[in-house]
Amino acid sequence: MNFSDYFVLWVGGLLTLMIFSFLYRDNPFYKFAEHLFVGVSAAYWMVVGFWTTFIPNLIGSIYPPSVSWFTANPEEARTVIASLYDQMWYWRYGRIVPLILGCMLLTRLAPKASWMSRWPMAFIIGYAAGTNLTRYLQSDFVAQIKATLVPLIVFNEAGFSLGETISNIVIVFGVLSALVYFFFSKEHKGWFGGTARVGIWVLMVAFGAAFGYTVMARISLLIGRMNFLGSWLGSVF
Amino acid sequence: MTFIEKMQAIDRRIIFLLIALAVIIPMVFKLVIPVRPSPIVQAIFDKIEELPSGSKVLLSFDYGPATVPENQPMADGLARHCMIRGHKLYLMAVWATGEAQGNITIENVIAKEFPDAVYGEDYIQLGYKAGNQGLINAIFTDLKGMYTTDAGGVDINSFPMMKEVNTLPDFDLILCIGSGKPGLKEWVQFAGDRGDIPVSGGVTAVEAPLLYPYYPKQLLGLMGGLQGAAQFEAALVKKYPQYKDVSSGAVILMGPQTVAHLVIIAFVIIGNIGFFVLRRREKRARTE
């Protein structure tokens, strides 16, 4: 293990302990580690986005020779530049539009010109709403209804399947009773109230399963950190 | 103060300490719990297994270092299985932190265990692009429009394995390892359902309950948390026992996981008993 590996291991180990110190009580070490994490994360996403999208997809497309500024290998740069020149002109120069919209978004920093940022914002919201609406309708509404329409008595190659039958009955009646619980136009009394009550139980089971999974996730992360601390201490002693 | 009252008012730091011990002690003594693949995990294994050798598999790394204990064994297991079966593996990331995780898989699994695999012919790192689900939407119709180069900046058309790939429907299987949004849910919505492409993968345990409704019609299988990763490793080792030494990262961690769960279950039971006993006492006191 060389010096840089040791350094990274020590920084990681000390920061882990600083974060764990919160379990005892809030303290300046925890705050330092927390702020460092937020800052590094924000910077990391920004730098990666700049080098993987902004440079190759925008600057490189609009002005292909610029690729050589960012590529160490001149041979690789020549190949990429040639392939960029192969793109249709409207595809290359069309990227000026998102560049302008991106610049307009930055006008939020100047109060007098901030109105210009509404245009790209409207474009982003419109695009996101348009694409998400259709996909959510298709995948989370139509496809989920289709997935709930299952036979209540299941026969497979081996004959009657008790397991699948019970599973399908639970799915169908679980969904219907949970939906009844959220139907507030009719008073929850009689058979309707009873079904709504079953719906509450179905929801409780779902919340319990979600909580159980959350506990499992947190313990897994703790195990990961303990593993790391073990390798850190192992390198020290 | 009675014992039950004391237990109800227990300092949370004692609980933290006991959980830490429940994790550390099984790790020190290397406690291993036997793991069996569940049908939902076995379905992923079977799909990779039944695809003809040379099939095109896209593996998206949509997580970061924060969830490595859960996600990395999943990614390593899937990559290992695809390489064993001789599939062409396309690595990409919708998360900025995902590319680095993909490189770890290349370094620890592909380069070490499959030294004959050739970059650009057997596997390729496409890297990260910004855009979240917009990226999935864009590459659905034009992958090379977004990925003009691989992650190393080399022209995408110079790689033999990119010749037959232009859109997402060109892939035989899409795998995503995710820990949030965008992740597996977006791959189902924007790729799987839209193009009728088989989608599968693994997510953190926190996210798993949100994905189960998609199984089995929209999602052909799912690994939920560390347990899902361990089950996939178990399925792989069952079929390919020669990989037992390298494919057991998640299985080993299931020992401390199980002990920690038992401690938490014990606290939940004690807490509930205490709650009901105290409530009963209060009722009695009121009636008297």
Image (cartoon, helix red, strand yellow):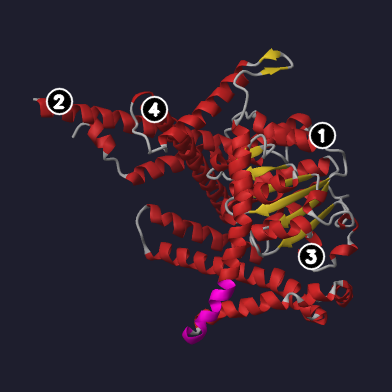
Looking at the image, is mark 4 or mark 3 nearer the viewer?
Answer: 4
* Residue extent of the magenta highlight: A111-121
Question: Which quarter of the figure has residue B284?
Answer: top left
Residue B181 against residue A182 in the figure, above or below? below
Chain letter of mark 1 equals B
Chain letter of mark 2 equals B
**Mark 4: which secondary structure?**
helix
Q: Give the spatial CA distance, label 1 vs label 4.
A: 48 Å
Q: Residues within 10 Å of mark 3 (few under 14, many from 20)?
A: some
- Which badge, 1 or 2, is on the more N-terminal residue? 1
- Which badge, 2 or 3, is on the more N-terminal residue? 3
Looking at the image, is mark 2 or mark 3 nearer the viewer?
Answer: 3
Residues A36 and A81: in front is: A81
**Residue furthest toward the bottom?**
A112
Residue A143 left/right relative to B155: left
Residue B26 left/right relative to A193: right
Q: Give the spatial CA distance, label 4 vs label 3.
A: 55 Å
The answer to whether residue A48 shows anywhere in this view is yes
Residue that badge 1 annotates: B50
Q: Which mark is residue B145?
A: 3
- Labels 1 and 4 positioned on one and the same chain: no
Residue A215 against residue A225 in the figure, above or below? above
